[in-house]
Image: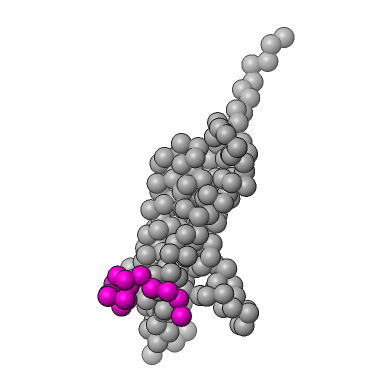
């Protein structure tokens, strides 16, 4: 008797030497790139818009970008959050922006925006990896 | 001190923006909800629904938290 059930089809994987690790790294470095590699243009564009938008807003609000440090645990966590934004973090560091303004309430908001942008980017990169592995459509 | 590009030296700083607390909360909710919707659910319909729910919870929680703080310290 033939089965009529539908079988979940794994997502079309990018050709070549692309691996799950590379997809994750690509998604981390450039927001949305992990989805673009799967030709998920709308998802990738929305992720790109959201992460870059939040990061730029954080800079515009005078948020602080943390540099690598081994001091206060909260500063270390802040740096980890910032690094998760990938190239946005490195470009900002090289450009010398993100000095922050601790005396301003908006500066504090901006700092949180920058960290949140990084964490959202990491979430998206992880999701793109799941799509690559066929764990998610 | 990190290296700086010429435009960073010329302009000295990133364009500064100032928004109200509510606007900042709404923008945060908007961006976070989009990412949550995409990453937490499968299928466009479910993703949109989850994103809207997350947005509503963000905004509702912000307003509720604001009123809570007001009643805790109204002066």
**Nearest the eye: A89 or B54:** A89
Which residue is painted at 49% across and 40% down in the image?
A37
Q: Start and end of the magenta stretch?
A: B1-18
Q: What percent of the width, then of the height, locates residue B68?
A: 46, 77
User: Of A100 and A87, which appears nearest the observer?
Assistant: A87
Main secondary structure found in the magenta portion: loop
Above or below for B41 versus A67? above
x%, y% of residue A29? 50, 55
Q: How is the image coloured?
A: one colour
Residue A73 sits in quarter? bottom right
Residue for point 60% across, 75% down = A76
Q: Quadrant of residue A107?
A: bottom left
Q: Is residue B49 visible?
A: no
Judge whether residue B11 is colored magenta.
Answer: yes
Given residues B57 and A52, the one toward you in this image is A52
Q: Position of residue A86 (x, y in %)?
A: 50, 59
Furthest-right residue in view?
A1
Image position, residue B36 (x, y; %): 50, 53
Quadrant showing the C terminus of chain B? bottom left
From the viewer's perspective, is residue B68 above or below residue A4?
Answer: below
Q: Residue at x 40, y 48 (%)?
A: A46
- Asked if the stretch drawn in magenta spans residue B57, the answer is no
| Horizontal side of residue B50 vs A96, given as left or right | right
């Amino acid at each position: 008797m033939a089965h009529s059930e539908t079988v979940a089809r794994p997502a079309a994987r990018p050709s070549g030497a692309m691996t799950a690790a590379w997809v994750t790294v690509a998604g981390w470095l450039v927001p949305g790139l992990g989805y673009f590699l799967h030709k998920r243009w709308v998802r990738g564009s929305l992720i790109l818009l959201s992460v870059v938008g939040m990061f730029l807003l954080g800079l515009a609000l005078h948020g602080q970008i943390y540099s690598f440090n081994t001091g206060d645990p909260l500063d270390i966590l802040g740096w980890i959050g910032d690094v998760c934004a990938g190239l946005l973090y490195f470009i900002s560091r090289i450009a010398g922006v993100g000095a922050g303004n601790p005396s301003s309430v908006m500066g504090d908001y901006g700092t949180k925006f920058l960290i949140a942008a990084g964490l959202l980017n990491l979430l998206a990169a992880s999701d793109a990896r799941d799509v690559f592995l066929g764990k998610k459509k | 001190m990190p290296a700086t590009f010429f435009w960073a030296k010329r302009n000295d700083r990133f364009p500064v923006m100032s928004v109200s607390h509510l606007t900042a909360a709404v923008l945060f909710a908007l961006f976070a909800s989009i990412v949550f919707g995409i990453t937490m659910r499968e299928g466009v319909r479910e993703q949109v629904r989850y994103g809207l729910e997350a947005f509503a919870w963000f905004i509702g929680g912000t307003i509720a938290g604001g009123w809570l703080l007001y009643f805790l310290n109204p002066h």
